Amino acid sequence: MNKEIIYSMNTAYRGEYIIQGYSFGSGDKAACIVGAMRGNEFQQLYICSLISKKLNELENRGAIVSGKQILLIPSLNYSSFNVGKKYWITDNSDINRSFPGNPEGQATSRIAAAVMEKVSGYSYGIQFASFYMEGIFIPHIRMIETGKQSNSLANQFGLPYVLTSKPRAYDTSTLNYNWQMSGTEAFSVYSKYTDRIDEESASQAVSSVLRFLTRMGIIRYNCHAGFISTILDEEELLNIKSDKSGGFFRRLVNPGDEVVRGDVIAHIVNPMTGENVSEIYAPTDGIIFFCQDTPMIYQNSVLFKMIRRLHN
Amino acid sequence: MIETVVSASMLIGEVMRVKKNHLSPDFPSGKEKRLSIVSGLHGDEVSGQYICYEVIRRIKKDFDKLTGIVDVYPFINPMGLEAQNRYVPVFDTDLNTLFPGSTEGTVGEYTAALVLKDIVGSDICVDIHASSVYMKELPQVRVNSDVAEDITPYAVKMNTDVIWVHPSSSVMAGSLAYSLNEVGVKTMIVESGVALKIDYEYANQIVEGLFSLMEFMGIWKGTVNATHIPKIAEDKNVAYINAESSGIFVPAVKHSEMIKKGDILGYIVNVLTGSVEETILAPRSGMIVSLREYPVIEEGSLVARIFGGANE
């Protein structure tokens, strides 16, 4: 394992700020893995720590294929973790909305530009990302439909689902989009949680990455074959909303649960009277893909995203 | 007439409402031109609150002079304004990246979709901003180069010092202005002052501009006191000065001052050692249209913008 500096800058009060990268093996730029960009991405950082340990072990026993190099950047944003902020410490900007970046721009833009330079040229790019809505997912690979995405390669991670989505306005400033545009096969891996550690889904994410690296001929590692992924278009997911009222969100189902049309899947409770103010029903048969994970919700919030007419 | 444009129950006991004041002649013919004035997309930008108040007050005072429709939307992000939060509270999302929005989305996207729908049909929209806490801005109109030809005849009426024509590639696709221009509502952004404060001189300058614009649109027959003739700037006329060290910025010039190439703009100082880390020089002659307001800076922080000729 070699440690290298991805970017460094001086700060007014925090001394030198250094983003570290860790490389394993040597030779062709085979795969690059990027972790937490926001200060609440604890699960993403945790997964990277597990991958780092595993790749180090594999390298020590000669299991990284000769002529292949893997770069791991566990986090671009240590400071936001340290001060309990989601976005960049000094100006609240989002590194994952700053790509491809500008080396003469503001700090997050400079970080994005420096990272872009370091991570370009890799055959495969893997990012542990978080969704803009806070909640729990079925672990999946998310691909932005840039025209360059490869669903069949995404399948090689062996996670239950691959989700494709049309680019939103802000997607063009994400690492994933710019990685794809620069010729790298880029994948965003979504684990179950973001702001808390979940050992089971972290372990699943690590296995999926090792499985992918094995299948791409970058490491030698025996692992379970995983799933043959079901490919979903984000637009096919059904949003279930709190359209009548806000209040306490008493959730009765979890991601991965199969539901039948008419099932009560949540209650919205009036925080003053304790009465149910609305019941949320499954509008069709299917599987819960995403759910909000907050104690209370606003009216018109997306509570669940559901895969229609699919069975476990 | 006060109308509610968006309404959603909050978590506990409160309802978020985006409202507008629909000002229309008593006996409209149905063929009136319509101006929409939008403010408070960013909850820390409060200048627009005073501007909306003053515009409505003056119209009501001389109501018989109004010959068209003026819709004033003072607070698109009401909870952000209450909470002194630039973004949508709880979601921590910039509302001005979520347009065109979606009625299927979260509170921010839902608000964006309904606000956009309500403004569509206007002939002109003015989106009033007030910079950020970091930079103080000279009153300026910002327009996208794609639509500059159509909008500039209206923008010159806004009584600002500068009209800044941005290359369309740098305009955020998720902004209200972008979305409105896409659907044919001529929209310009007005920036002035600094967040969290009202600069009454600048705000009144913009109020005069709005009445001048209304007169030009043929919807106001009352008094107009616009006195400023704006200079039109393209990107090549604007120099960005970013810090190359971290520390405290001590300015050596005043905002909106004329300076010469090589003049000292300010110093970045180290508060522990008492030394000057960097002396920042003007890269070109011109006027300081933006100057750092929040003094704590890091490498890459924007310190000033100078509007002058092309790079010398």
Image: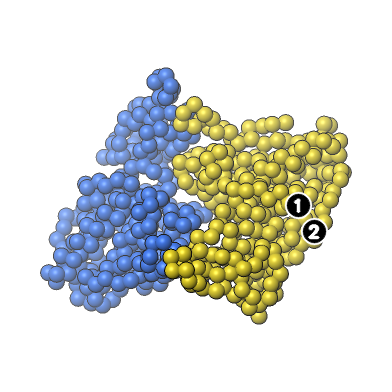
Chain colours: A blue, B yellow
Q: Is residue B58 above or below residue B2?
A: below
Q: Is residue A150 above or below residue A202?
A: below
Residue placed under numbered mark 2 in the picture:
B228
Residue at left offset 17%, top offset 69%:
A59
Front-lying residue, A74 or B114: A74
Residue at left offset 56%, top offset 50%:
B96
Q: In the rendered structure, which amino acid carries the disc numbered 1?
A: Gln
Identify the chain of the residue marked 1, using the numbered disc in the image: B
Q: Secondary structure at mark 1?
A: helix
Task: Report, in whole angstroms, how far the alpha carbon at label 1 lies from the one at label 2.
Answer: 8 Å
Q: Position of residue B60 (x, y in %)?
A: 80, 35
**In the image as oriented, which residue stretches furthest toward the left?**
A61
Residue at left offset 33%, top offset 38%:
A288
Query: Could one spot residue B179 in this view of the protein?
Result: no
Q: Secondary structure at mark 2?
A: loop
Looking at the image, is mark 1 or mark 2 earlier in the sequence? 1
Quadrant (top left/top right/bottom left/bottom right) for the C terminus of chain B? bottom right
Q: In the rendered structure, which amino acid carries the disc numbered 2?
A: His
Query: Could one spot residue A156 in this view of the protein?
Result: yes
Q: Are marks 1 and 2 in contact (CB under 8 Å)?
A: yes
Front-lying residue, B168 or A148: B168
In the visual, does B8 lie left or right of B255? left
Disc 1 crowd, CA 10 A, few/some/many (<14, 14-19, 20+) = many
Q: Position of residue A124 (x, y in %)?
A: 32, 66
Residue placed under numbered mark 1 in the picture:
B205
Q: Is residue A208 above or below residue B272?
A: above
